[in-house]
Amino acid sequence: MKATVITYGCQMNEYDTHLVESQLVSLGLDLVDTIDAADFVLVNTCAVRGKPVDKVRSLLGDLRRQKHERGLVVGMMGCLAQLEEGQQIARKFEVDVLLGPGSLLDIGAALESNQRFWGLQFKDELHEHIPPAPQGKLQAHLTIMRGCDHHCTYCIVPTTRGPQVSRTPASILKELDGLLAAGVQEVTLLGQNVNAYGFDQGAKIAGIPSFADLLRGVGRSGIRRIKFTTSHPMNFTEDVAIAMSETPAVCEFVHLPVQSGSNRVLRRMAREYTREKYLSHIADIKKHLPGVVLATDIIVGFPGETEEDFQHTLDLYDEVGYDSAYMFIYSARPGTPSYQHFTDLPREIKTERLQRLIVKQKEWSQKKNASKVGSIQEVLLRGNAHAEGFLEGHSRGNHPVVVPKALGADTAGVYPVRIGHATPHMLYGAVLGSNGEALPELPRLTPEAAAVSSPLSMV
Ligand code: 5AD
Ligand code: SF4
């Protein structure tokens, strides 16, 4: 049997896709790249906003046709699968296998059962499960915890992924050993709220280090680069910034979602911090990590957000000076408190505010990226860029970077790159020659060739 997994959503989902793919391989299935080549298509879903749900709905419609035409077996996993909304969609589109985020290891039982199989339980065995290292990749994700104990009023994740469970350092370090042996150079530690690592349901777990100490421990493993996501301002502590500054492998990059710059909106979101508290974290980060690259998430048009509230978000943006931001229009998700209790703002107000925020983000990203022109960045080049003759990758600060091939590098790897040109979404450069000097010619991309999709603004 040939299988493919289609992934929507966040890096957690990418990690879970890898985990399930490795299960499929150990069950004897062959992984293929396209739906057409597959007998079993598993859709890894996201439920955080309405848009990804719509995408899943339309894909499943297509897959149902193929189910009738050629006997395709269809599966659904991930956050949407855990929700009543997702299960209704699954019934409508005649999904054969449905696995919530806690039931991924049931995939074998599901395929063996030969009838409709729905797994919705949170199984303990998942937490310490170590998937085999990805082969031939320089970058990997490593989940250090699952679930979330916060209850932001807009967010469906605590419902879909359950309460927080931290993994033991022993299993994290064992998984890391496997990644190192497979040649991985950059690991991204994943959790809904990595700063709360070791504090499940608010209680410190004996024998589990703080997140700062975990960073130090991972730093000692010999891995070249460490990133992590996501931090929650409620649980962020200065010792994390200190550990970052003292651990050379940890990249100078912090993604600290603020969601709004207005205390009134933050309260209604139940974010459990104020604008002032947030800014004090940013000050700590800048103090210990000069030159740090800062990213955030912002929701515009939360119910009840006034023009004045929105102005507070815009001026917070200026106060922090973010390098990049993921910007979202508020999406009322059934099952969340804000869906139940608040009235959604008109679409026009939300989109108009998003447009203004995007203008601000572009200005800042252009300014920040332009300041990198002339600098040397350590870039992990993943492989071919969309434009032929170019490689793409990421800096330690998580900037997407594109370089021409055959100027010191024609394969994936970690290289020093002299930056020659910047746009709000991309740095362009050339790999330094082995003598440490920049290569003189820096071929410029045409705008068409440079049109690599921007990861920065998601509506
Ligand atoms: N509407 C819009 N954006 C949302 N996010 C989470 N829930 C919603 C929602 N209901 C955004 C937050 C979070 C990111 C992962 O998705 O900004 O940080
Ligand atoms: Fe949602 Fe808040 Fe948990 Fe993030 S920390 S997943 S925003 S509830």
Image (tube, grey):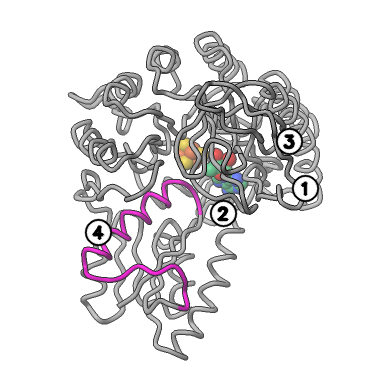
Among the two numbered marks 1 and 3 on one chain, the one whose residue lies closer to the N terminus = 3
Label 3 Cα crowd, 10 Å radius (few <14 / some 14-19 / many 20+): some
Q: Position of residue 17 (x, y in %)?
A: 38, 56
Q: Quadrant of ligand 1?
A: top right
Residue for badge 2 = 333
* Image mark for residue 423: 3
Quadrant of the rendered image containing residue 115: bottom left
Q: Are marks 1 and 3 in contact (CB under 8 Å)?
A: no
Tell me the residue that label 4 is attached to: 105
Which of the two marks, 4 or 2, is nearer to us in this view? Answer: 4
Span shown in magenta: 9-36
Residue type at numbered disc 3: Thr
Say if disc 2 is inside 8 Å of ligand 1. yes
Q: Which amino acid is tagged 4?
A: Leu
Answer yes or no: do the residues labelled 1 and 2 have beta carbons within 8 Å?
A: no
Label 1 amino acid?
Answer: Pro
Q: Residue at x 40, y 35 (%)?
A: 186
Residue occupied by mark 1: 447
Q: Tell whether position 12 is magenta.
A: yes
The residue located at (68%, 27%) in the rendering is 262
Measured Cα–Cα span from mark 1 to mark 2: 38 Å
Is the residue indicated by label 3 positioned so its CB lies within 8 Å of ligand 1?
no
Q: Position of residue 293 (x, y in %)?
A: 58, 24
- Estimate how packed mark 2 is, as few (under 14), some (14 to 19) or many (20 or more) residues with alpha carbons within 10 Å: some
Seen at 66% across and 23% down, the residue is 372
Nearer the observer: mark 4 or 3; the answer is 3
> Which numbered disc, 4 or 2, marks the residue that appears first in the sequence?
4
In depth, the one of 136 and 328 nearer the eye is 136
Q: Secondary structure at mark 1?
A: loop
Indicate the quadrant where residue 375 lies: top right
